[in-house]
Amino acid sequence: MDGKKSSGTDPARSLALLWGSHTKPGRSGLTVRAIVDAAIGIADAEGLDALSMRHVAERLGVGTMSLYTHVPGKSELTDLMVDRAYGELYDDVGAPSAQPGGWRGAMEFVAVRNWELYRRHPWMLQIITARPVLGPNVSLKYEAELRPLDGIGLTDVEMDSVLTLILTHVEGTARVQASLDQVQQDTGMSETEWWLASAPVLDKVMDPSHFPVASRVGQAAGQAHQGASDPVHALTFGLARILDGVAALIAQR
């Protein structure tokens, strides 16, 4: 997927919009909330490439210029979309901490909720957010996900690093899954169907004597996953290894 830039060129304007009231209607009866909801609906159904201020206006049945009195442009709109989507993660800031299994169970919960969010809104994976969208829901997310790591023996920087490591892993596997979904949609062939068609041909052309380890491991993985990869397996396997490492770090203290 091609990445799209996020965050407006004017941080102050973007932050004011993110933290402002989204319920007060303008002269046209529009609200920022309605505009963002329409934009998310378009991105969910048609992808981020289909999103434009004009398309949002058409969906709302208003003139395009009326949108600009509420949202300055597409960059600010995508910031609002990201923040709104993250608001779906937790009903309460204490939700991750309330999970069974201590900090480890909480981090597993965090990983699954973020994975599910990307599955609902794959367009989020197309937005480049090297600089985070510092909206209220993003801030609430950060607070909720850090709390289970507080007081377990990690420094503040380590807490941030552990959370970043987990979320980066989730994003990476979700990105692979989204790519597989797109390929299946484009080709009409599932990953299992592709593997069943490819494996016999690969067995004939790939000489195991030249690639002994790759042949053995690739065949075992392919049979296990019924495809070249399994993002769900990668998610759970990688997350377990990350949490094992965090547990080892804590134990050293």
Image: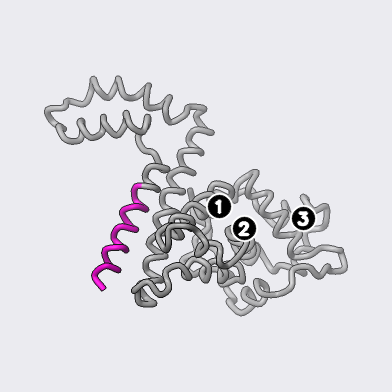
Residue 86, percent from left and from top? 58, 61
Mark 1 Cα shell of 10 Å, populated few (<14), some (14-19), many (≥20): some
SS state under label 1: helix
Q: In the picture shown, does residue 184 fall above or below 138?
A: above
Q: Which residue is mark 1?
A: 117
Q: Position of residue 147 (x, y in %)?
A: 48, 70
Q: Amino acid at mark 2?
A: Glu
- Does the residue at mark 3 contact the one at mark 1 (Cβ under 8 Å)? no
Q: Quadrant of residue 200?
A: top left
The residue under label 3 is 57
Residue type of the residue flagged with mark 1: Leu
**Identity of the residue drawn at 72% across and 51% down:** 55
Tell whether 195 sits left or right of 22: left
- Relative placement, left or right, of 3 versus 162 is right
Q: Which residues are magenta?
A: 237-253
- Sequence order check: which comes first, mark 2 or mark 3? 3
In terms of image quadrants, where is residue 160? bottom left
**Mark 3 → mark 1, Cα distance in angstroms:** 26 Å
| Along the line of sight, the residue nearer the viewer: 198 or 253 | 253
> CB under 8 Å between callouts 2 and 1?
yes
195, above or below 109, in the image: above
Label 2 neighbourhood size at 10 Å, few (<14), some (14-19), many (20+)?
few
Q: Nearer the viewer, mark 2 or mark 3?
A: 2
Is 243 drawn above or below residue 22 in the view shown? above
Q: Residue furthest bottom?
A: 12
